[in-house]
Amino acid sequence: MSIARIRLGEVRSIGVAQPRLEARDKVTGHAPYAVDHPVPGAVYAWPVLSTVAAGWVSTVDTQPALALDGVLAVVWHGSAPRLEPIGDPGLLVLQSPRIQYRGQVVAMVVANSLERAREGAEAVVVDEQPVTADTELRADHPALYAPETVNAGFPGMSVVGDLDAGLATAAVRVDATYRTPAMHHVAMEPHAATAFWERGNLVVFDSTQSSTSVRDALAGLFELPPQMVRVVNEHVGGGFGSKGPGRVTAVLAAMASRCVGRPVKLALTRQMLFSLAGYRTPTIQRVRLGADERGRLVAIGHDAVSQTSKVIEFVEQTAVISRTLYAAPHRRTTHRVAPLDVPPPTWMRAPGECPGSFALESAMDELAVAGNWDPVQLRLANDTQVDPELGIPFSSRHLADCLRDGAERFGWAGRDPRPAVRREGRWLVGTGVAASTFPAITWPSTATARATADDHFHVQVNAADIGTGARTVLRQIAADALGVAQYCVEITVGDSAIGPAPVAGGSMGTSSWGWAVTEACRRVRERIDSLHHGRVPAEGVFATADTTEDVAAREEFARHSFGAQFCEVRVDPGTGEVRVSRLLGVFAAGRIVNPTTARSQLIGGMTMGLSMALMERSVMDRRTGDFVTDDLASYHVAVNADVPAIEARWIDEDDPHLNPMGTKGIGELGIVGTAAAVANAVYHATGIRVHDLPITPASLLR
Ligand code: MOS
């Protein structure tokens, strides 16, 4: 068959709804996760964790563990292979006696069965010398400082005009402080790795959002050229940011394998994840808004405080959303951070924008109440087509359309703005709205495409499919770029041997990997057409792509996705129980490649926002630095019964300034603003403004 014959006229795969390619493998248990790969001769590792928040390991008595039949090794800082320091000191595990947080790895037992490894870990005696630990974030913490840059490379501070002068001229003002607690990702698959050494090469099956960065980290730590390290992450059972950076699991498994000369499997328990897998920092945010008598913002101030650990400087970009969302002549955003004796926080579910939007979008609701403006109209009045701080145009911005479309579908018109007046039976009913935005990021990636003489195409890109549908949408993109039907295309992801590609994070996956896939496929198609007259020769046709220059050559634009979140809640005034009864999100996020997986991403994000608003809170015992809510019985997340009628819609957005597919990214947009929409609806239902998440019965029964 010639390739011309399988170009079935106007075959288009982008935009077609379809289920995930690996769906059957997943639900039948055939999809191998990090420790599922059958590796002959594998043994098991179990970490031993510190029980104090700060101090030193003075001695480790390994004898009781080594005396157990089947225990092969006890690895601790006195016996561990030396690691070469790299950028992330959090990966330098078992290199020093210093304890910097509770739940840090201080030893590891390797044994020929999982049970024996665990028993061995309990038998090891670690003598810890504690020092006084400082574990509590406060707005007046003496260690707070203002870093020059915060996460994702944003400047720590931004100033336009004169905030105080602007506030002084405002007709209506809001000055409020909001708090969000520490939160954990709790992905279904724990952080886990299988590692073995093969003729000096290191192979790791890792549960990671980026096998490229894990490969680079392991190469650095073990002083190997990167091509001697291979990291495979074919299936990843969720990440939400916690598997973005390399984690100690891969390092420990590689170390253990080197020590015992056998393949090693290591899976953290759910409890261990609460100290070893990162979490979202708690935040304390002061927002000041000032508007003129018509509801036009004249001043926006957002001051954010967060914590980091003493292991790494990690500064959540909490206030950056206030640089983007609304126009105003006078504005200032600041970040301060306190290094504490706590586990290192990390990226989590729209880091920055998610907690930041709770504060900003709650404050906008307070401003609407103070000025007697409709919350939708207030947001429309402060919309802008030019980035308010950078002064450059947005590549596309349809926030206003999202707000208008959402308001119409939600039935916003005629809403009685008075709080606590609508009742249905015993329930007080209220509605709330909030805006959403997230940067539309594209990073350089590589990809390859190969055509074979039987008109089969094999496209490879080192994407990580963390449950999003990445491989499914990448095959759709590949099919369109090749001009063939999808069934002719096989896609392979999740293997560092394919070539460098960015993290499945920052909502940039589809845009970044998809651009490289498009380029590689176009080249193959061009060669087939120009060199071979539309026929694939016996030897096949192969092409690679690297989009580094394409990405760098883009015109300067502010690139963001936008959305509007609408929420209806019911509150039982007797018990303080809050039930979300309706959620509607309307989004403008460029071209949507696959409506099925896109909807799943968006309602997943909205559900996590609901969960954040009403349930999620990691509680630390301040005396011990221990996250005591360390399982899914004590760390509450929304379950099916908590999720109401939920709808995600999108506006068709044709943006030529993004990438060849016209995609913006949808992984994180859904969670941004949702918690504020819930809190604003709770205010409307009850007249009680909750500034501290989560909103529990205790927040409402005063
Ligand atoms: Mo997402 S928190 O960028 O993995």
Image (cartoon, rainbow, N blue to C red):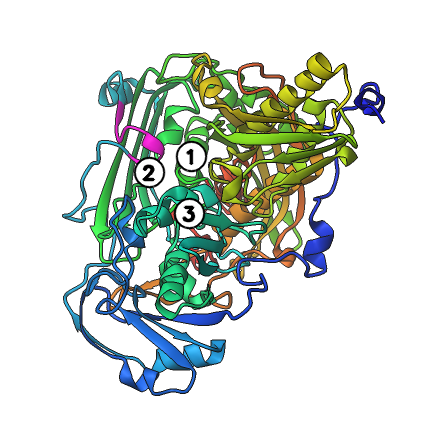
Q: Which residue is mark 3?
A: 228
Q: Position of residue 232 (x, y in %)?
A: 52, 50
Disc 2 target residue: 176
Considering the image in quadrants, where does the N terminus appear? top right
From this view, report whether residue 565 is shown above or below residue 702: above
> What kind of residue is marked 2?
Ala
Residue 690 can be seen in this image: no
Answer yes or no: is residue 539 visible. yes
Badge 3 element: helix
Give percent across and percent down for residue 6.
83, 25
Q: Residue at x 48, y 80 (%)?
A: 115
Residue 366 marker: 1
Nearer the observer, disc 3 or disc 2? 3
Range of magenta residues: 150-158
Q: Measured from the top left, where is residue 341 in percent x and y? A: 23, 58
Tag 3: amino acid: Met
Query: Looking at the picture, how far across and down is residue 350, in whole percent?
Result: 46, 40
Label 3 – label 2 distance at C-alpha: 54 Å
**What quarter of the picture does the C terminus occupy?**
bottom left
- Mark sitting earlier along the chain (2/1): 2
Which kind of residue does numbered mark 1 sit on?
Glu
* Dot 3 or dot 1, earlier in sequence: 3
